[in-house]
């Protein structure tokens, strides 16, 4: 015969799967935060009809990122086109702001950006940097 203690114990065991599911969700969110702690973006305004040139520069360049500590991923995204320009943004994800900052002072960074001024005719102004710490 089950005692009150056995019944309470069974109830706790019955409730545990729900609690563990919640714990798993929280753990997954924390793991995601650890993987995506800092996002670095540069916004570019590109002269009309030079979009393909800009895209080809990025497709064919050596990024020197794959062996950099803390680097997670990179994307080049295209935004709206207006009469005066088309917006693009480079989007890199890092384990931390510090990892990104260390990269900006590295030889890999210098190599990735060498010759950047050679294509100044396709840009309207300098890229605009934005850095974001990931919250969620």
Image (spheres, grey):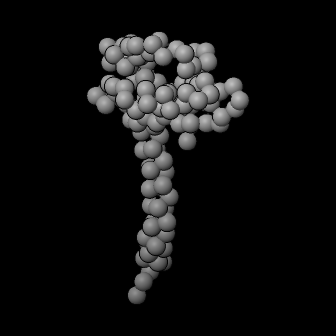
What residue is shown at x 32% (from left), y 13% (from top)? 107
Say if 34 sits above or below 17 in the image: above
Q: Position of residue 58 (x, y in %)?
A: 43, 29
Tell me if I can see residue 81 in this picture. Answer: yes
Say if 75 sits above or below 53 in the image: below
Q: Position of residue 88 (x, y in %)?
A: 57, 31
What residue is shown at x 46% (from left), y 24% (from top)? 97
Q: Quadrant of residue 5?
A: bottom left
Residue that lies at the very extreme toward the bottom in this rendered image: 1
Q: Quadrant of residue 125?
A: top right
What residue is shown at x 43% (from left), y 70% (from top)? 13
Q: Position of residue 40 (x, y in %)?
A: 50, 27
Q: Position of residue 89 (x, y in %)?
A: 55, 30
The foreground one among 74 and 123 is 123
What residue is shown at x 55% (from left), y 27% (from top)? 50
135 relative to 84 in the view: left or right: left
Residue that lies at the very extreme toward the left in this rendered image: 67
Tell me if I can see residue 102 in this picture. Answer: no
Tell me the quadrant of the picture where the N terminus can be found.
bottom left
């Amino acid at each position: 015969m089950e005692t009150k203690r056995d019944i309470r114990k069974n109830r706790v065991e019955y409730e545990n799967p729900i609690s563990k599911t919640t714990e798993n969700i929280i753990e997954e969110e924390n793991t995601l935060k650890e993987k995506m702690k800092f996002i670095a973006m540069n916004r570019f305004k590109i002269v009309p009809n030079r979009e393909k040139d800009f895209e080809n520069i990025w497709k064919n360049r050596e990024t020197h990122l794959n062996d950099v500590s803390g680097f997670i991923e990179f994307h080049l995204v295209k935004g709206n086109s207006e009469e005066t320009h088309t917006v693009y943004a480079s989007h890199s994800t890092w384990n931390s702001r510090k990892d990104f900052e260390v990269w900006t002072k590295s030889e890999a960074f210098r190599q990735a950006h060498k010759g950047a001024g050679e294509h100044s005719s396709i840009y309207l102004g300098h890229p605009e940097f934005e850095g974001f710490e990931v919250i969620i």
